[in-house]
Amino acid sequence: MVTRRDTIAALGSGQPPCAIAVVRVSGPDAFAAVGALAGTLPPPRQAGLRVVRRVDGAPIDRALVLTFPAPASATGEDVVELHVHGGTAVIAAALDALTAQPCVRLAEPGEFTRRAFYNGRLDLTQAEGLADLLASTTEQQRAQALALADGALARRAADWRARLLGALAIIEAGIDFGDEVDVRDGLDARIADDSAAVRAQMVSALTSAARGERVREGLTVVLAGAPNVGKSSLLNALAGRDAAIVSPHAGTTRDPVEVTLDLGGVPVTLVDTAGLRDSDDPVEAEGIARARQRAARAHLVLTLSDDDDWACAGERVRTKIDTLSAGGGSAVGAIGVSARTGEGIASLLEWLANWAGNAAGSGGDPALIVNARQQAAVAEGCAYLAQFGAEHDPALQAEAVRLALRALGRLAGAVDVEDVLGAIFGQFCIGK
C-alpha cells in the first residue's frame, strides 16, 4: 500500500466484455479527477449523463456519473463511479485517462475495502465476510458470508465489549472508592454475573467455529480402494464429466484427482486416489503414500470394492453392480453403484448431500465464527474471562478484563492487526 492519501481508480465490475462496466474512483482528488474528464458533476447520489473525454478532449464514451461525498461512501472517502459501456477498449481508455492525472493511480488488490476498514466503514470481521462472499460458490457459503459481511459477529462483539467495559468501570470504581459502603455493596456479584454471561455467549459462539469453517472451506471425501475397483469411473459419474483418466491398467491414477461439487449448498471436494496395494514401482508407491495421507486428512473416506467378500472400516461402496448375477445382490451395508449404467449414482449423491448437511450443520443460523483468526481472538478473550473468575484481587480482575477487551479489539481489527491485513485484503480483486 503506497499511501491512503492517494486517489485510486479501478474497474469495479466484472471483466469485459459486458453490457455496462463500473469504474470506481476513491480519494481526496476523486471529484477533481473525474470532473476534469466529464466536466460538471451531478449532485451527490444522482446519476448524470456525461461525455467522458481524454485529457486532450477526445471523447471516450457517454457515461452515467455518480458521486458519493465523504464520509458517507463505501470507502469513507469521496467516491465517484463511472458507468461506461463494457468494452475492453472503453474501460482501458477511461482508466488511462484517469491515471494520466498526477493525483490518481491504479488501485491495489483489496485497497477500496482496506480504506473502508481504515475509515471505520466496516470492521475486520465484516471485511473477511466480504472476501468470503466474493469467493462463495454455494448457497451455504453465500448465506454465511453475507451474515458476516452484514455485521453479525461485529454486532455481537460490540455487545460483549460494551458489557465488559461496564464491568471494568464497576471494578475500577470499587478500587477507587472501596471505602464507601454504597459503592461496594453488590459490586462483586454484579460484575461476576456480567462477565460470566459474556463468557457463556463467547463459548457458545466458539462452538459454531468448526461448522463455520467447514462451510467456508468445504468438506473432503476421499475415494479409496484397491486398483481397478472403479474409483476414477465413480468420480467421473458423480462429477458428470471426465475429470479422471479411466484405464483397465492398474496404477493409472498416481496423483490425487479432485472435483468439487455443490451438495445441498455445501462445497464437497471428491478426491480420486491411487489404488492401494504393495508396489515396487517408486512412482506408484509415492502415489499410494499420498493416497493414504489424503485419506487421513479427509472428513470422509468412501472405501470402494467390486467384490462382495470383503470387510473394511468406514463407509463402503459396492461398485460395478451391473456385473452382478441375477439375485446376487450387493455387500451388506454397502451402497451399490454402477458408473457404467448410472444405477445408484443418484442415491449416492443424495446420501453424500445428507452427510454434508449434517457435517456442516446446515439448516440452522449461519455460524458466527468462520475462520481461525476469529476463533483465536474469541478463545483468548474467553481464557482471560476465566482467569477473571478465578481472581479475588480487584486489580488482577481489572487486568483480566482489560486483556479480554484487547482480544475483542483484535477480533474487530482495532489493535495489533497490521501483520494480517495484507493477507486478508490481498484476497480481494483489484476493484474491491
Image (tube, helix red, strand yellow):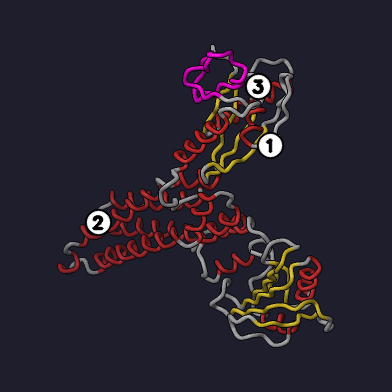
The image quadrant of residue 186 is: bottom left
Up-down: is 217 above or below 150?
A: above
Disc 2: which residue = 193
**Which residue ends up furthest to the front in the rendered image?**
326
Q: Secondary structure at mark 2?
A: helix
Quadrant where the image shows the C terminus? bottom right
Up-down: is 296 above or below 267?
A: above
- Indicate the amino acid at tag 1: Arg
- Indicate the amino acid at tag 3: Gly
Distance between mark 1 and mark 3 Cα atoms: 21 Å
Q: Which residues are magenta?
A: 310-336
- Indicate the amino acid at tag 2: Asp
Q: Is residue 129 left or right of residue 364?
A: right
**Which residue ends up furthest to the top in the rendered image?**
309
Where is residue 178 shown, x and y percent of the image? 21, 66
Disc 1: which residue = 241
